């Protein structure tokens, strides 16, 4: 849209445009916004020596069996997240289907803390076994899968790079890289480590004739040095941009971060004030960049006797709801039984807010007068909320289209604030 000059004059306005052009270009480059791709609602971490081609399905079966032992999904939903019996039944049906069809959305084969220090021969063999299992699983693998390798601190750097090299090489030598390949760089303490990871990714692409930018990675925020630098700045913000577009997500590391601050083990938690501060910094750093956010894990597992299992589910469901309400749409799961409350709490979050969000989006899109006057940014948030619910399976396309009186493509367009791809 062209704007006619007023008294300032066309030549003066052109000078302003020219002066701001570099800032405009930098803003567009560094803050492109959400690209519309799917974000998983969780990441499952398993030690490398426990990973198998059937692991995701095994976790789904174990989750369903554990739920059955404790009264079924209906009863667990009523005890943890559902406000009515009908809501519990509705949630139970959706979660049961999910646990049968896609129990794990994102799987990380762990060669770091969950795996520990092994001999080189043993870790090399575990990498080869992981590659073989991914190939064996084929289309039954989770849509996102990859490894967490050892960090770039000097004492384990060489081992971490060897594992990464063997993993990427093993996949590249046996076919295409998985579409949802995801790599996790842990314990980042400097922007230099992110820059080094970019160099490593670029070299692996060169060696294997991969497209530029094919290898991205997540940064695990679990050190004080990543949250506050010696000059009082937030290094995590610089890390995103040092990644040159390869950083896909920031994951909060609950226990390493808490321990680094000297917090006693009994009080290390996803909801400790120190954790909230770190995650608020992460959220600010990632805003507008298209980099996703993930909360961490709780090590209080739903295992043991009935009381312990039910207490574990109550805690986990509350923590999942908490991070969803705070704009962290992903978290970690460490045990199959946590899948029960991961999906129940997530689905309840989207279904609880759906009617109001759909009504407000419908009123905005169709310019219907109401008691709430939503602006474009809020409409984008409403559409984004509904889109996330539909992508993860909490909402059906029919429900969305009926409640909003909009085709699903239009909802997605409003969520991304851009026309849908042809």
Image (spheres, rainbow, N blue to C red):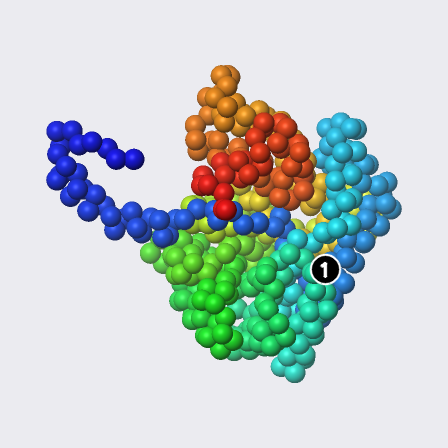
Residue at image coords 27%, 48%:
23
Residue 376 seen from this side: yes
Residue at image coords 57%, 49%:
38
Q: How many marks can you see?
A: 1
Secondary structure beneath disc 1? helix
Along the viewing direction, whichever of 399 and 255 lies nearer the viewer: 399
Residue at image coords 56%, 56%:
253
Residue at image coords 17%, 42%:
14
Q: Position of residue 9 (x, y in %)?
A: 12, 34
Callout 1 crowding tier (Cα within 10 Å): few <14, some 14–19, many ≥20: some
Residue that lies at the very extreme toward the bottom in this rendered image = 121
Along the viewing direction, whichever of 114 and 18 lies nearer the viewer: 18
Q: Position of residue 283 (x, y in %)?
A: 47, 46
Along the viewing direction, whichever of 143 and 233 lies nearer the viewer: 143
From the viewer's perspective, is residue 222 above or below residue 47?
above
From the viewer's perspective, is residue 235 above or below residue 80?
below
Along the viewing direction, whichever of 419 and 355 lies nearer the viewer: 419
Q: Position of residue 331 (x, y in %)?
A: 61, 50
Residue 239 seen from this side: no
Q: Position of residue 229 (x, y in %)?
A: 38, 57
From the viewer's perspective, is residue 249 above or below residue 71?
below
In this figure, which residue is indicated by the disc labeled 1?
140
From the viewer's perspective, is residue 207 above or below residue 257?
below
Specify the quadrant that holds the N terminus: top left
| Horizontal relation, residue 204 to residue 31: left or right | right
| Horizontal relation, residue 305 to residue 20: left or right | right
């Amino acid at each position: 849209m062209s704007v006619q000059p007023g008294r300032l004059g066309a030549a003066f306005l052109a000078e302003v445009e020219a002066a701001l052009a570099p800032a405009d270009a930098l803003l567009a480059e560094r803050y492109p916004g959400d690209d519309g791709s799917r974000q998983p609602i969780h990441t499952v971490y398993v030690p490398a020596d426990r990973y198998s081609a059937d692991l995701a399905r095994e976790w789904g079966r174990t989750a369903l069996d554990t739920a059955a032992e404790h009264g079924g999904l209906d009863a667990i939903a009523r005890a943890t997240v559902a406000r009515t019996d009908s809501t519990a039944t509705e949630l139970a049906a959706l979660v049961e289907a999910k646990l049968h069809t896609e129990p794990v959305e994102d799987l990380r084969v762990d060669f770091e803390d969950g795996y520990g220090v092994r001999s080189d021969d043993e870790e090399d063999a575990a990498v080869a076994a992981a590659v073989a299992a991914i190939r064996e699983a084929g289309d039954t693998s989770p849509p996102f899968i990859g490894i967490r390798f050892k960090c770039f601190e000097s004492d384990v750097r060489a081992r971490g790079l060897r594992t990464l090299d063997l993993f990427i090489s093993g996949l590249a030598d046996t076919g295409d890289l998985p579409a949802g390949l995801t790599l996790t760089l842990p314990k980042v303490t400097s922007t230099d480590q992110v820059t080094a990871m970019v160099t490593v990714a670029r070299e692996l692409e060169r060696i294997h004739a991969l497209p530029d930018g094919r290898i991205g990675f997540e940064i695990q925020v679990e050190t004080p040095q990543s949250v506050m630098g010696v000059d009082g700045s937030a290094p995590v913000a610089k890390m995103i941009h040092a990644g040159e577009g390869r950083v896909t997500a920031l994951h909060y590391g609950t226990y390493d971060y808490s321990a680094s601050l000297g917090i006693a083990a009994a009080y290390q938690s996803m909801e400790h004030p120190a954790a909230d501060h770190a995650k608020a910094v992460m959220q600010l750093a990632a805003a507008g960049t298209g980099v996703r956010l993930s909360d961490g894990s709780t090590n209080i597992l739903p295992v043991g006797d009935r009381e312990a299992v039910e207490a574990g589910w109550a805690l986990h469901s509350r923590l999942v709801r908490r991070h969803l309400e705070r704009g962290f749409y992903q978290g970690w799961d460490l045990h199959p039984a946590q899948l029960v409350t991961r999906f129940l709490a997530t689905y309840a979050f989207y279904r609880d807010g759906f009617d109001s969000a759909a009504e407000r989006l419908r009123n905005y899109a169709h310019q219907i007068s109401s008691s709430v006057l939503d602006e474009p940014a809020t409409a984008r948030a409403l559409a984004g909320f509904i889109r996330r619910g539909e992508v993860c399976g909490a909402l059906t396309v029919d429900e969305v289209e009926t409640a909003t009186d909009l085709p699903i493509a239009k909802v997605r367009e409003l969520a991304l604030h851009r026309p849908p791809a042809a």
